[in-house]
Image (cartoon, rainbow, N blue to C red):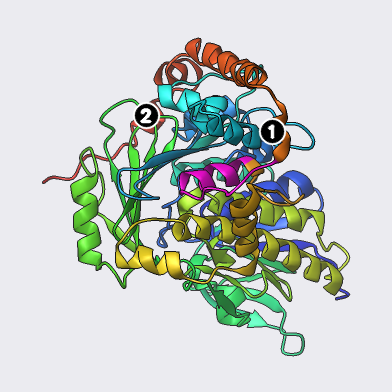
Amino acid sequence: MTESRIRKVVIAGGGTAGWIAATALSHQFRDQLEIVLIESEQIGTIGVGESTIPPIRAFHRFVQIDEREFMREVACTFKLGISFEDWHRPEARYFHPFGITGHGTMACEFHHFWLDSLRRGMASDIGDFCLESVAARAQRFALLQQPEINYAYHLDAGMYARFLRRIAERHGVTRIEGKIRDVRQDPGSGFVEALTLEDGQVVDGDLFIDCTGFRGLLIEQTLQTGYEDWSHWLPCDRAVALQTEAVGPPVPYTRAIGHEAGWRWQIPLQHRVGNGLVYSSRHMSDDEAITKLLRDVEGRPLIQPRVVPFRTGRRLRMWNRNVVALGLASGFVEPLESTSIHLAITGVISLIHLFPFAGIAPSLVDRYNEVTRAELEHVRDFIVLHYHANEREEPMWKQCREMELPESLAARVDAWRERAHAWQEPNELFRVDSWLHVMLGQGLQPAQHHPLARALSDDDMRRLLASIRQPIEQAVAKMPSQQDFIERYCKAGPEVWGARQPALQA
């Protein structure tokens, strides 16, 4: 254990990850730590991820964020899941909802009963038994308690960072404007001692959080931690991001639309739409990607398209010496299932759990690295599944279909194919419901399912399905459109609409 007590935390870099860290740490430790965040207005943030997953709501409750205030200030819309279009094959579509699907038993999950109902000729869609799927189809939303609705947000990442900054600064976080020129290390231990800015200012600290994005200024450029590359499983390595005017009311889901060399996202906010094209540079050039995105989007562009190169993978250690990497500095799994903000949140929450007030203990550092590694690999496996299970004929997709899977994912795919078995370990993000919707949606048909489902008579099976389906249909019928609900609940104010950028001239 290092003997120096942790009294001062320095966050290198702002953006979403930096201000998430500042907000969480200052909320918990405002009277025990000095917290400084260094960022430069001259360094732009990536900002391609404007879609979230439901655990963000638990984080907001943790730091006591009022939902309506947050949604008004960040131009939010609601998100019930993701619509996957042209993924399994062209013209095919399925929905990955955030909610619970059906009602099973302790011994047998609902999807086994549903699969047996198909065997008996009772046609239905698995989404018919999930509130979030049915509401998304109807483009409706309401904050229901019974049945409870599970949702996340579409948000403006830049506005979100500014919103969190105001909270963190109220809790005593000091922001320093400037670029980091160099990093000073202790010659014996290799621990980071201080950061020198371009104006000569020296910012010392005891614990440093690296939120400097892909470059990993502290964790990689300084400490040379190492990186595990996952591009052999996830071939896309570039994205083009573009904001456009909204041409209609926002839908309550993210769209992920497959194309010959990757996929395209569409994220509706209150004041605009976030768009992007993710692609493999081995199968599509930057110019081709930009042309395709501009051709396929709806609405007038508000900014020039910008290309963002990336490399999927993870740092070999997220915590090295006295540096903890968060956000893009820690690793990157492409934004297909909207996990980037979530991983920054869980990273800082794990740090709070293991915070080294009395000095950095190697056992706790090892525990942090094991937890964050396992979480990122779980997310990786779920994303790889989307690429591997496909029937598309383009070279990139064929390569993904034929590739050797990570052992952990191969075990899940085999268990599903053989007996429709899916599972969620205690600390895993994606639930059984998520795995089954994606596996079914991607065309993975199981050879058999649990025999317990055969115990129901046909009449009992019909009653079971109706008892689940009818309350969902009744609840959705009473919901307003998402647009109407937003108008009443969280309509963004003039300060948001006033910041809207004019459309680019053709």
Query: How many dots with numbers?
Result: 2
Relative horizontal placement of residue 21, taking residue 27 as reference (left or right) = left
Residue visible at 76% across and 48% down in the picture: 30
Question: How far from the left and from the top, in percent, is residue 81?
Answer: 50, 37
In this view, the residue in front, 318 or 95, is 95
Pointer 1: what residue?
453
Is residue 447 highlighted in magenta? yes
The amino acid beneath tag 2 is Pro
Question: How far from the left and from the top, in percent, is residue 261?
Answer: 31, 62
In this view, the residue in front, 473 or 413, is 413
Disc 2 is placed on an element classified as: loop
In this view, the residue in front, 141 or 495, is 141
Disc 1 is placed on an element classified as: helix
**In this rendering, is residue 498 above or below 30?**
above
Pointer 2: what residue?
250
Is residue 47 highlighted in magenta? no
Within 10 Å of disc 2 (Cα), the crowding (few <14, some 14-19, many 20+) is many
The amino acid beneath tag 1 is Ala
Q: Which residues are magenta?
A: 433-450
Q: CA distance from mark 2 to mark 1?
A: 39 Å
